[in-house]
């Protein structure tokens, strides 16, 4: 560890030569814990089953190697926060220096798992947008994590005094909305699946799983009386919403969004407390997402559209399921007024939505019927009938609106999504028109945005509306290319 | 309709009541028709060959039940592909030539592409990240080139195919230079 001694010494933390800082010394404890647990379990079992066998000594050697590796990794890794960049040096086998310019940093993500929290540590991830532009500090003390977040996200050299403003805080009652979103309902299955997988793996390693035993287990299950099966299903049905609330609470507990030094800081979770900081000037829009159940309960999920943010679905989250009025209020505090009311799309779009929803099952059904697959054909017929209300709802949810500074587009039914985007975030407009849309006088307008998904579609707008929408938001780009009024049509979108 | 019509702007003026996009000013090179025709012939030729193989294989296999029904009609497959390919190769290139147009104004790249389905794309020069001129082997034979325009968003990125080489190279260099000068912070 020799280096030029010109750099100023770091403020805090285990100080390595020349201002470089090391990760927290306890880091390798957490890092090695997982291996330790597995090896200890295997070693203890080996001791019980075979006494002081070769396997046991191998386990011990493995343990020693694991520890040595983690200690060396810790000793050879340093980081330096400089005026213009943060450097991560790794010199375990190959020397690498990863240098992330500070003006490219788009977010700092601080995570504390349960183990880290016990030891007062936190993992800091620095997101710099570009591919591979992510640096991980695993792990530093929680004070150092807070300092890094403040220093790395502050544009000016002197960090301003922390001036936090709470933008949103989750109410306790909202945990009950968890069962409404499908993902959390499935958690009992996921938990049971991973538990069974774990038991199987451990049992297999210890030689407890034999073909014989599995066959017997299968017979036992098949031989269960019907009442037991019904009871098990009932328990599962009750367990699903309860478990979903518990898991949701663990992940999203005390969800709080603060504004601090020009960044949005979202913190959430009881067991693993996660804190994501987003630079406010890179937040170019928000999205409001809900499904039919959440719509019925008038709740919505809120997310931020941030330029160059990896893993945006998780990092950009601003609110889990929350009452709509509250979510809109938070959106307006983050972004400004949400344009509205939404303009419905022309009724010609209704037919297109219904046809597009019903055509696939109908087509499969016709093919199935023609080759004599009666069952499949009936199933497809049912799906086709169900697709009609889906298509009608998809049409009902279409809408767009704009004011002088931002616009909003809404679409989708099973997963309805309304985006609100700042007009300065638009990097281009794309108008699409298929032959069928041309006959119906419709066009789809894609707003290309350098944030979030990269583009948001206004499906099946009236063709002149699509052009007028773009022209109203960015007149400089669109007006020069409009047909002068009263000119002969030249193949452009028309009514 | 009312919500999208904002108040008149000092820099823009009123949006006309039923605005239509006019076609961009420039056609692509006429040699692009030859390029597209050769491409369609090659692709459909390959598909036709594969279909012949599948038909021969399906005809010789002795299946029972439902797949047998498919096997009896497998001979139709190459015919369908052949007819579709011939029609596409005959009609699409000329149609595309009539649709494909481009124009670069002071600060916006405006293109129209497609044939059955059409796309109008407006990308301001200030939001362009890279502009590249490239040539495939077929384009090199015909003296054509493609200009690829990339923005921070995939939706806003586009390709201008069928330009003469000298025009494409000049355009790409010009766009890259102006994008650098006009670059603003939408990313």
Image: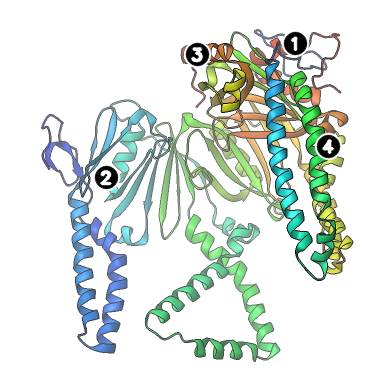
Q: Is there one chain holding both mark 4 and mark 2?
A: yes
Disc 3 from disc 1: Cα separation = 35 Å
| Secondary structure category for the residue under label 2 | helix
Which residue is located at x 84 percent, y 60 percent?
B72
Q: Mark 3 points at which residue?
A: B173
Question: Of tags 1 and 2, which is closer to the observer?
Answer: 1
Q: Quadrant of the C terminus of chain A?
A: top right
Chain of the residue that carries numbered disc 1 in the rendered image = B
Question: Of tags 3 and 1, which is closer to the observer?
Answer: 3
Q: Mark 2 points at which residue?
A: A144
| Secondary structure category for the residue under label 3 | helix
Q: Which of marks 4 and 2 is nearer the N terminus?
A: 2
Disc 2 from disc 3: Cα separation = 47 Å
Q: Position of residue A488 (x, y in %)?
A: 86, 10
Q: Name the residue under label 1.
A: B14
In this picture, is A410 found above or below A32?
above
| Secondary structure category for the residue under label 1 | loop
Question: Are dots 4 and 1 in contact, CB under 8 Å?
Answer: no
């Amino acid at each position: 560890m020799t280096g030029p001694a010109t750099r100023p010494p770091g403020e805090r933390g285990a100080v390595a030569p020349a201002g470089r800082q090391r990760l927290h010394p306890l880091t390798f404890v957490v890092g090695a814990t997982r291996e330790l647990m597995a090896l200890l379990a295997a070693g203890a079992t080996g001791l019980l089953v075979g006494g002081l066998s070769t396997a046991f000594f191998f386990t011990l050697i493995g343990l020693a190697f694991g520890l040595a590796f983690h200690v060396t990794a810790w000793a050879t890794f340093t980081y330096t926060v400089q005026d213009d960049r943060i450097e991560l040096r790794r010199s375990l086998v190959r020397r690498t220096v990863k240098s992330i310019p500070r003006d490219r940093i788009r977010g700092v993500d601080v995570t504390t798992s349960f183990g880290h929290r016990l030891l007062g540590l936190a993992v800091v991830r620095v997101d710099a947008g570009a591919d591979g532009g992510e640096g991980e500090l695993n792990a530093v003390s929680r004070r150092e994590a807070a300092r890094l977040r403040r220093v790395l996200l502050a544009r000016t050299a002197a960090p301003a005094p922390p001036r936090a403003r709470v933008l949103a805080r989750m109410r306790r009652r909202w945990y009950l909305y968890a069962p409404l979103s499908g993902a959390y309902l499935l958690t009992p299955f996921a938990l049971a699946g991973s538990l069974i997988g774990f038991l199987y793996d451990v049992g297999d390693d210890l030689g407890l799983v034999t073909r014989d035993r599995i066959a017997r287990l299968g017979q036992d299950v098949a031989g269960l009386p019907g009442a037991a099966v019904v009871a098990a299903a009932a328990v599962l049905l009750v367990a699903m919403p309860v478990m979903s609330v518990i898991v949701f609470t663990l992940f999203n507990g005390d969800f709080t969004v603060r504004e601090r030094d020009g960044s949005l800081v979202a913190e959430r979770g009881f067991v693993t407390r996660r804190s994501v900081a987003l630079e406010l000037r890179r937040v170019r829009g928000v999205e409001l997402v809900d499904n039919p159940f959440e719509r019925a309960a008038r709740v919505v999920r809120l997310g931020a559209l941030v330029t160059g943010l990896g893993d945006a679905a998780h990092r950009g989250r601003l609110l889990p399921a929350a009452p709509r009025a509250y979510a809109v209020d938070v959106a307006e505090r983050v972004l400004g007024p949400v344009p509205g009311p939404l303009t419905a799309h022309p009724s010609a779009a209704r037919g297109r939505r219904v046809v597009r929803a019903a055509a696939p099952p109908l087509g499969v059904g016709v093919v199935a019927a023609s080759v004599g697959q009666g069952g499949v054909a009936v199933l497809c017929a049912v799906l086709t009938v169900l697709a009609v209300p889906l298509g009608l709802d998809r049409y009902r949810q279409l809408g767009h609106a704009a004011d002088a500074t931002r616009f909003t587009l809404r679409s989708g039914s099973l997963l309805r999504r309304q985006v609100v985007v700042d007009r300065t975030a638009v990097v281009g407009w794309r108008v699409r028109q298929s032959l069928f849309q041309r006959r119906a006088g419709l066009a789809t307008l894609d707003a290309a945005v350098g944030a979030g998904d990269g583009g948001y579609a206004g499906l099946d707008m009236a063709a002149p509306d699509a052009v007028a929408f773009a022209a109203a938001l960015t007149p400089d780009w669109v007006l020069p290319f409009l047909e002068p009024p009263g000119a002969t049509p030249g193949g452009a979108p028309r009514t | 309709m009312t919500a999208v019509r904002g108040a008149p702007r000092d820099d823009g003026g009123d949006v006309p009541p039923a605005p239509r996009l006019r076609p961009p000013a420039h056609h692509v090179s006429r040699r692009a028709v030859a390029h597209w025709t050769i491409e369609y012939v090659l692709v459909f030729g390959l598909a036709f060959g594969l279909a012949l193989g599948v038909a021969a294989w399906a005809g010789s296999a002795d299946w029972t039940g439902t797949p047998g029904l498919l096997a009896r009609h497998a001979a139709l497959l190459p015919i369908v592909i052949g007819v579709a390919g011939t029609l596409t190769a005959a009609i699409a290139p000329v149609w595309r030539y009539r649709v494909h147009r481009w124009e670069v104004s002071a600060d916006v790249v405006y293109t129209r592409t497609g044939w059955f389905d059409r796309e109008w794309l407006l990308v301001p020069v200030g939001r362009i990240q890279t502009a590249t001129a490239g040539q495939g082997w077929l384009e090199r034979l015909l003296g054509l080139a493609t200009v690829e325009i990339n923005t921070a968003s995939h939706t806003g990125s586009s390709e201008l195919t069928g330009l003469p080489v000298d025009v494409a190279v000049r355009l790409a260099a010009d766009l890259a230079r102006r994008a650098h000068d006009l670059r603003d912070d939408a990313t």
